[in-house]
Amino acid sequence: MTPQQKFTIYIRTKQVFSLRLRTEFDDLQPVHIPSKEIEERFFTFPDFKRKDEILALVISGELRVTEKDKRFFYEALKPGKIDLSLLLTKPLPEDPIYKVILNHLKSVSLPPGAASTDYFDLFLKYQQDRPELFFKVDEFAGRVHSPVSNFHRSHRPYLLLDGEQTTSLDVACMQPTLLGKILREAIPGNEYSGWINSGKDIYVELQTKARLETRDEAKKKFFEILFSKPSNALSNLFGAADWITWINLYKATPQTLNPHGKDKPHSNLAWLLQTTEVKVMAQIWRKLIAAEIIFVPVHDEIIIPISKAEQARVIMSQVLSNEFVYFKISGDKLNKDFSTVTTRVKDPAPSRIPDELAELQKYYSDLESRGDIPDKHRNYIGSLWQGVQLTLPTNHLSLSLYTDALEQLKSELLTNKHIAA
């Protein structure tokens, strides 16, 4: 194989792999390859002159080269071979959690006849031998990217893990909820966090504020302005408020930890929201690993075997209740959403309650009446009781998950000298 052929194959291979950050409806895009890499790996000086070799490939109709912002982008113009061995991979972050997630990708499959894409089929073909080629932790915020996270949403419900049907659990409105958490800590008592923490539909509230015709219009405007450069657009639409002033100031203030902060300081808020999201989700991932539940992450979502859905939902609830005043967990194959903004322990739905559960209910109700439930546990306890209501009276296996969690927390609370049995 000549260096020219090898270079062309490399470009074509990189173009195919660039689709991992897009959807199956996108065309192959030109790829940037540094001149230093080209000279070191393909056209070594003085045996070859890089510019002359590339020009010959352009003239022969094999390649197209374009320049943008003083960077050269290459595009293979003819169909042909790809070679995965030419691709280089960066080492994973030191945190062992990423090695576990990478290993979980080896368990992903599709049932016969399920919708797929060329890129996903390529992943399935090579997932055992070179899964690292299909796995990336981005440098901007630490988000995990994989063929699953980039698989079209309409195709994901058919994914299998270890040959078992899967379901997904995600945090509804994660970005607005994260912003509510951040603003609550930065500006106690602000109206935005108040909307979020009371479980109101944030886009309806903003629609009303801005007097827009539809909720979708409010959502679109909100995100457009949120991640654009600082301006008066937010206050013009939604009114002057302390939380809007804080957002504009944060987007204008250099943040040294933001990789794009120097050149694009307006990306500060996107970076803050995404890094906070990763920190929250990583807590969930660790607990799933400890519980030996296989999963694949999709940003604010996890895909798990459907038999583990209730157990995973308890784990998610436990983590989220420590982070947010209000949250909602949605499941694509579950009957109900799971939300909490708990102010008191509620009785389970009328049914023949097992004795041990009735005792637990009395214990927590007594704590509530005395005002002895710690704030940091209030939402978790409330979400567990909601789980009890969802699973009574028939699903005894799922009910035991919530009972066990309530029993464990009871033991922890009893170790506190200020809380009596």
Image (spheres, rainbow, N blue to C red):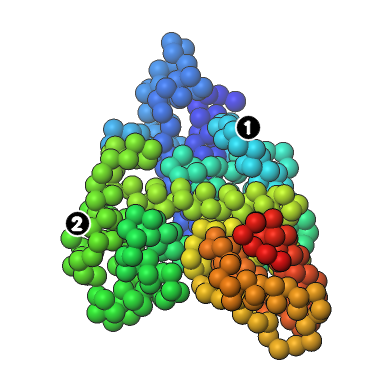
Q: Which mark is residue 189?
A: none
The residue that label 1 is drawn on is: 85
Q: Position of residue 44 (x, y in %)?
A: 47, 16
Instruction: Quadrant for residue 58, please give it.
Output: top left
Q: Which residue is mark 2?
A: 231
Residue at 50%, 27% (x, y): give it. 4
Q: Is residue 44 above or below residue 19?
A: above
From the top left corner, tell me how far across and down residue 10 is, in percent: 53, 34
Q: Is residue 334 left or right of residue 355?
A: left
In this rendered view, identify the residue nearer to me: 63 or 135.
135
- Residue 308: horizontal and vertical position, in percent? 74, 63
Quarter placement of the C terminus: bottom right
Label located before the other in sequence (1 or 2): 1
Under tag 1, what secondary structure? helix
Residue at 33%, 48% in the rendered image: 267
Single out the residue that lies furthest toward the top.
Answer: 46
The residue carrying pointer 1 sits among few (fewer than 14), some (14 to 19) or many (20 or more) residues within 10 Å by Cα, namely few
Q: Can residue 146 be seen from the camera position used here?
A: yes
Tell me the CA gap for discs 1 and 2.
47 Å
Describe residue 67's horizontal placement relative to residue 323 as left or right: left
- Does residue 394 sit above or below 136 in this rendering? below
Query: Which residue lies at the image location 55% right of the left edge and 24% below the top edge?
Result: 2
| Circle 2: residue type | Ser
**Relative to 73, does residue 287 appear above or below in the rendering?**
below
Disc 1 marks which amino acid? Ser
Mark 2 residue element: loop
Seen in the picture, residue 335 relative to 279 is either above or below; the reply is below
Q: Is residue 334 visible?
A: no
Which is more foreground, mark 1 or mark 2? 2
Residue 242, horizontal then vertical, whole percent: 25, 61
